[in-house]
Each structure stands twice: as structure tokens, then as C-alpha cells.
Amino acid sequence: MKSVEQHIRDVLELVHPTEPTELDLLQAHGGVLAEPVSAPVSLPRFDNSAVDGYAVVATDLDGASEQDPARLPVVADIPAGDTAVVTLRPGQCARIMTGAPLPGGADAAVPVEWTDGGTGTVTVDRPVTAGNAVRRAGGDVREGDPVLRSGVRVGPSETAVLAAVGRGRVRVHPRPRVAVLSTGEELVEPGAPLGRGQIWESNSYMLATAVRDADGVASRHAATGDDPDSVREAIEDAAARSDLILTTGGVSMGAYDAVKEVLSRLGTVWFGKVAVQPGMPQGAGTVGHDRTPILTLPGNPVSAFVSFQLFVRPLLRALRGLPPDPLPSVRARLAAPGLTSPYGRRSYLRAVLERDGSDPEVAHTAELAARQGSHQLSALADSNALVVVPEEVTELASGDVVEAVTLDGT
Ligand SMILES: Nc1nc2c(c(=O)[nH]1)N[C@H]1C(S)=C(S)[C@@H](COP(=O)(O)OP(=O)(O)OC[C@H]3O[C@@H](n4cnc5c(N)ncnc54)[C@H](O)[C@@H]3O)O[C@H]1N2
Ligand code: MOO
């Protein structure tokens, strides 16, 4: 049986980062920068006021107090965005709003709260130091400074910086387009009535949302039956429009395993067993004219979920031009009755991970879900971690220290 690590290496071989593309700022969201970005101008671009108040010459307020306020003529009114060129002479001041350019000659701003708010003349009841409430040109970023490096995800803060340095468009590895197909004659759309032997389809919904959470653009296709022609058509159609195809079901030893039957004929897709539980039957390769990568995940819902976390997630990162890091894991003490695990396969067991300050060595406890069958979805939503049982370990007892892969950043 193929090892988990070997299968991860094999699937990573199938993909290249998405082609760097220049996109409008909002479309770049979730993409990964394919260029370093620097500031074309200094930010702030000009000295400006940090307060609504008055621009002054600081020395004009020397000795000002409530008993003996300074009285200054207001020679200009400067709102934010003002384009007039204003210069103060000693003894003068200008009314100014937050973000408005500081007039020439002024070296400080005082907030309106320190004054009587006058518009012809103003009284100021305390002294001020030079530089007070002035936001200096270049005080945030200097012209030419790098502000974002290549390889970062474009999220809200990056988008703010891009817009602030004047970038309306930016080169990114776009979010990969992922087609999700499920197969199986027994599958019925959620919301539709169930007939005998039928179940509601869940894998494609789980995968489409997992892909979106991982910054992919998922397109979900209604389930095909087990008819090889309709499976082939759906895959061909998806290949032309996607950077990655994910299928579920139809890859094991069944007489109607259509995905395996159709793709085996092409000779470009490997099918076999990976030494993992759940998620043993896997397939991976390329299809179509553009050699679109395809991963065929097993149909059991928990197997499909675990396969996504182990194999699809790093592959999506590689498609996005990021290092294919696995999910982070922590050491945890097992709080559960003893359990057995198949020799030679690495098990990933659903568990609730909690911080536990009582043990300085191991900061978490992991409580295993009671239902660990690969069809038993109910435990998945309650779990926030996958406890890893190594290939050579067949028994675990309460109190053992285990590795737990975190599913929610715990
Ligand atoms: N003789 C053997 N039988 C099986 C083996 C084996 O090695 N030898 N492996 C088992 C393992 S492990 C798994 S996992 C499954 C994988 O089977 P398939 O990928 O072929 O999946 P199906 O047979 O189509 O379905 C399995 C199971 O999952 C349900 N299912 C499928 N698709 C969906 C969906 N979209 N939404 C919800 N549930 C789905 C399906 O109804 C089946 O119950 O094979 C074992 N058998
Ligand atoms: O490996 Mo299957 O994925 O146990 O259910």
C-alpha cells in the first residue's frame, strides 16, 4: 500500500500554480500576490492635521492659559481635500480638518476642544509643542518602500494597503477553479424525497464548501449516476473549465464503480490503496486536453472529508503558489477509553481538542468521538481535530500522548 507521504508527493506532482493574472482589486481577494508591491509615493503624501482644529505656529501659543488665552486671527479654512495653497505668517492660524494639508509656515495643530471654535479669530487656552497633531509626509511609508511581498494572500489588510498605494489592479495567482462531482445511483439532492435505497447527497456540498474555505472557486455539479457515459461527460466538461477536478465515490472494488472504470481506460489516472484509515481507496492523475489534475476521493463521507484535509488541501495551496503545508498539529493527551487501529494504516480519528493548562508538557486533551465509522458523519461537526494513530500503533489507552491535527486553528 502507498504511504500517505508518497501520495501527497504524487498529487503535488500533478499541479502548477495558477497563471499569474492581473485582476481588479476586489477580484484579487483570496488570490496570492505574484509580484512584490512598493509605494509609488510617500504616505502620507503631505504633512496633514491629525485633528479637527487649527493649524498654528507653535511659538505663538507660548504662555497661553485659561486665564490668559492666546488670540489669533483665522486667515483660512482648510477642509480635507483642499487644493488651495495657504501659507501662514507668524501670529496667524487657519481652521483645519483632520487629513487636510498643513499650511506652509504652520508647525502644529491644536484640536478644536482647546479653543472657543472661532471662525474670525480664535482663542486657544493652552500652549502647544511643535509637531503636535501633525502627520508627517512619509510617516507611514516612504516612496519606493516595499509594502507587500510576493506570495502573500490578498485579504482585507493587504487590499487596504494595495488601494492606499494606488493600485487598482494587481498580479495574483488567482483562486483555483475546482469542479466537484459526486457519483452514485443512490444519491438524491437534499430537499428532494427519498426513495427506497436512496440517500441524500452530502459529499459534493462538503467538498464545495471546503474548497471555498481554502480559497478555491468551487463549482458543484449535480450527482451523476453510475452510468459510465454520463460520468465521462461530466468529467470532460469539468476538465475544460477547471484547474482541478474532485470526484467522490466509485473508486473501490464495486461492480458499478464508474469513476474507476471510465478513468482507468485513459491510462493517465492511478488507482490504488493508500495506507490510511479512513480514505484508503484513492485515485489521482490528469484528464483532458489540458491535463487537468483530478483526484478521485472515496465515497464514504468521512473518508472524503479526511482525504480533502490530507491530500486536497496541500494541493490547493500548491495551485495557489503557496508552500503545500499540511494542517498544523499539536500534542494532546488522549481522554478516551482504549482503542484499536489497523496495523500498517495511519488512522485519523475525529476528536474534540481542548486546551488544558494543568499539564506543562502537553497543553491539550483530545477526546475521541464515539462513532468513528467512515459513514458516521454526525461526529464530524462536533469535532475540531483529527487524532493521528501511526501505522505501527495498534492500541491506544487513555492518557497516551498523541498528535492531533487541528481543523479550526485551535
Ligand atoms: N470489497 C471491498 N469493498 C470496499 C473496500 C475494499 O477495499 N474492498 N473499500 C471500502 C472503503 S475503505 C471505502 S472508503 C469505500 C469507498 O468506495 P467508493 O469510493 O467506491 O464509494 P461508493 O461505493 O460509491 O460509496 C461508498 C459509500 O459512500 C456513500 N456515498 C457515496 N457518495 C456519496 C455522496 N456524494 N454523498 C453521501 N454519501 C455518499 C455511498 O452511498 C456508500 O455508502 O469502499 C469500501 N468497500
Ligand atoms: O478507507 Mo474507507 O475510507 O475506510 O472508509
Image (cartoon, rainbow, N blue to C red):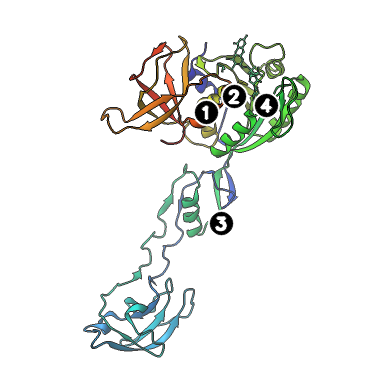
Q: Dots 4 and 1: beta carbons under 8 Å?
A: no
Compare marks 2 and 4 and give the one earlier in the sequence: 4
Q: Residues within 10 Å of mark 2 (few under 14, many from 20)?
A: many
- Taking the image as shown, residue 259 lies to the left or right of residue 53, namely right
Which disc number belongs to residue 168?
A: 3
Note whether residue 105 is visible. no
Q: Secondary structure at mark 1?
A: helix
- Residue type, numbered disc 2: Pro
- Residue type, numbered disc 3: Gly
> Which residue is the site of mark 2?
301
> Which residue is the site of mark 1?
380
- Taking the image as shown, residue 294 lies to the left or right of residue 323, namely right
Residue 33 image point, x, y percent: 50, 45
- Residue type, numbered disc 1: Leu
Q: Nearer the viewer, residue 52 or 168?
A: 52
Q: CA distance from mark 3 to mark 1?
A: 42 Å
Q: Is residue 395 above or below residue 187?
A: above
